[in-house]
Amino acid sequence: MANFNLTKGHNLKIAGEPQKVISASISAESIYLHPKDFLGIKPKLLVKQDDAVSVGSPIFFDKLNPAVKFVSPVNGTVSEIQFGERRVIEKIVIQNNGKSETLKVDLVNLNKLSAEELKSRLAESGLWPTIRQRPFSKIANPIQTPRDIFVSVYSTAPFSPNNAFVLGGREEDFQMGLDALSKLTSGSIHLNMDGDESAPIFTKAKNVLINTFNGPHPAGNIGVQIHHIAPITSKEDVVRYLNAQSVADIGEFLRKGSYPTEKIVTIGGSSISEPTHVKIIKGTGLNVILDGKLNSSNDVRIISGDILSGETRSLEQGIRFYDETISVIPESTDREFLGWALPGLKKYSLSRTFLSALLPKKSTLFNTSMNGSHRSIISFGRWESVLPMDILPEFLVKSILARDIEEMEKLGIYECAEEDFALCSFVCQSKTDVSGIIRAGLQLAEQDA
Amino acid sequence: MKFLRRFLDSLEPHFINEGKLKNYYAIYEMIDTFLYTPADNTISGPHVRDAIDLKRSMVIVVIALLPAFFFGTYNVGLQEALHGSGVTFQNINLDFLIHFLAGLKTVLPIYVVVFTVGGIWEVIFAVSRGHEINEGFLVTGFLIPLVLPPAIPLWMVGVATTFGVVIGKEIFGGTGFNIFNPALVARAFLFFAYPGDMSGDKVWTVDAMSGATPLLAVSSQEGMSATALLSGDFTWVQMFYGFIPGSIGETSTIAILIGAAILLITGIGSWRVMLATTVGMTLTAVGLNNFGTAIGSTNPMLYIPPIYHFVMGGFAFGMVFMATDPVSCAQTNRGRWLYGLLIGFMCVIIRAINPAYPEGMMLAILFANAFSPLFDYFVIQVNIKKRKRGYA
């Protein structure tokens, strides 16, 4: 067991923190699948409009990894397949008939399964995509054997669910999931948790190496944790990681033989009337999840994921596959007169350039204002102050802008993911899109053969 | 105020897309975002942003410069009165307003020239290059007059500002890309192009009466103790308060330290650079003091104690406002230490060893500016090597 104390970073104090209550399950008339949620796959449809599907039926697969299936979480019919430009699949809509017919596989004792058999079961089941890999944050390549597998149950991102709370009652599933994962690597399963974690589901987990982390966001981010435990050294040094709920899903699948259809997500933000946890069927549309929960439906931004690294979504879309948080905040419309000269008693800033620095930080009504205009990168040392990694962010960003792949590699691009740099963008006085640049750098490095 | 907002909104279509004035968008953007916070919203994550922007950062620097500006202007008036009337410092009326207004007659025209000439260049480059008008010039423009001798002819101010803005900054691509501090480039240009007007004992007061600076007073004598040379008009306390001839903003150490406190509290100025510069200066001065004794030198400059270096000439001003320029200083935290140490070292070396020019701070900072990419390079190599070792 190793303990890591990280000091750099920041926990945003945002109004609309979700209550630790799971409001009643939400049933969905139709669910949405978005192949775009998966980085770098080439989706190929296995169904046509009006096809009948049941829980666990494959809907599409990845042409680059044909074994990996993406399945339906409900019973019903494919009611619509929406294409975007150049026939990119935007979304697949499945009408839910509410029946519980489920594709089941025979139950086999996990101990008797070989790694190959387990892999092919997971790939068929639709659970394989929950296993991702670093570098590049994409779906794990089933052909490769990862060095280690990492699971973070320490959530530091704004509004993210408390994993011990969310997994209450699924202790057996979770342990079974960990046991299954240990078959997929010759290395270790690292279970990373809060230094103050007390839930036995995590502290008493077996077949894992436990690492504890203390510190503000992004200390809970898997990339930051991997950096401190056992850094990724090259493009070929592949490690895998998954969310806590996905580990339990794998365990449940192995115990019951059917695809787990539900997940618990948080809805938070100042535009939500009662921020809380909700249990949803995977793929439920945001219009259903947020029905009656918005303070005002005008001028709000709906974000799948946390407020720092999430993606803007419309009500007619579902939550992103990997996200467990929905954040809703007001869009900014106001423009302050001579804002740069005001004392700024209510401004939220990690710099001490506003009078609010003298007051304790309060939950703030954040809106989507950029709070400034875009300027050249000027280093006041702000990025470094919120990045708990031994990475020189400014030089990494500059090497990416210069498209110098060799330099990027030397500066540690493979250890990076855009979410770890979200706070760098947050604090930047020049409003540099650090996360976007990191993503572009990863793409460049990946394409470079 | 609603009316003003509506007026600006009605103008905007002319400056964007295919509007007739689209080439002049930078000017619209400058006025629009000066008056109102920008309308930009986040597009992708992070969806919320810190309240700080570059405008705020630069305004903080200008606020930090105000004590030096007010005292400097007052001191210009005071020095003129001292040398014009022949009264001694002990007998002169120190009233702030009288001397400040007198000083303003000299200082204000310099500011007008700097901001007019510099502003025109900024607009020309922003419009022709299609980038925004950067707030950086606000600080550069505020700095340039404060590092000039008050008696400088205004045409020289214009030429120097042009050189500082165009050669010091814009040819590199504008704020954020320059390798030297533009305000120092302007001053260095004057120093090398018009040395007679920039140093010597004739330039520090407007009426060209003798007004040697403390550094000049020390460097011009041989075989005497530095502190003895300074004991008359230039006691340490007097230099600390700043009632001495010198460049407009550099004389008062206490006014500069108030600015330093503002920069450090707000986190806009790098404490590493300021501390390292002080440490570098102290170590070098102490070393030279001992070296002078050891070889029995008659050069009084070798014997100036560190606390005198601190209050003399442009040291404090350069350390607080010039060395900490985030663009031209080293970009890594470790690099900033080396950079600061080099400035402190070079400043004292130039002051003590160079017989021609007793003021070392400007050249020390420019020298360190040139070296800062090298320091960063070393820091990056260490980071890369450490990563390789960790991987192995």
Image (tube, grey):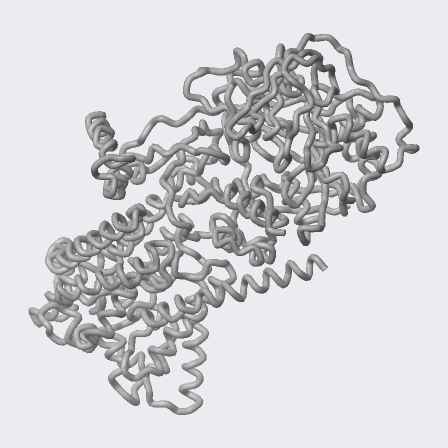
Residue A41 appears in which quarter of the rendering?
A: top right
Residue at 27 percent of width and 40 percent of height: B29
- Judging depth in this view, the residue of A15 and A27 nearest the camera is A27
From this view, report whether residue B207 is shown above or below residue A91: below
Residue at (36%, 46%) from the top-left corner? B54
Where does the image place residue B23, in percent across and percent down from the top left?
Answer: 25, 43
Tally of marks: 0
Q: Position of residue B81 (x, y in %)?
A: 10, 65
Residue at the outermost bottom position: B296
Question: Could you tell me which quadrant the N terminus of chain B lies in?
Answer: top left
For residue B168, above or below residue A52: below
Q: Residue lying farthest right?
A: A112
Q: Residue at x 14, y 76 (%)?
A: B210
Q: Nearer the viewer, residue B61 or B94?
A: B61
Q: Position of residue B191 (x, y in %)?
A: 24, 72
* In this rendering, position of residue B58 left or right of residue B87: right
**A291 left or right of B125?**
right
Q: Residue at x 43, y 56 (%)?
A: B270
If the image is split into quadrants, where does the C terminus of chain B sit?
bottom right
Where residue A270 appears, as percent x and y from the top left, is: 48, 23
Residue A351 in view: yes
Judge from the rendering whether residue A121 lies leftward or rightward of residue B217; answer left or right. right
Horizontal relation, residue B43 to residue A61: left or right: left
Which residue is nearer to you in this view: B73 or A269? Answer: A269
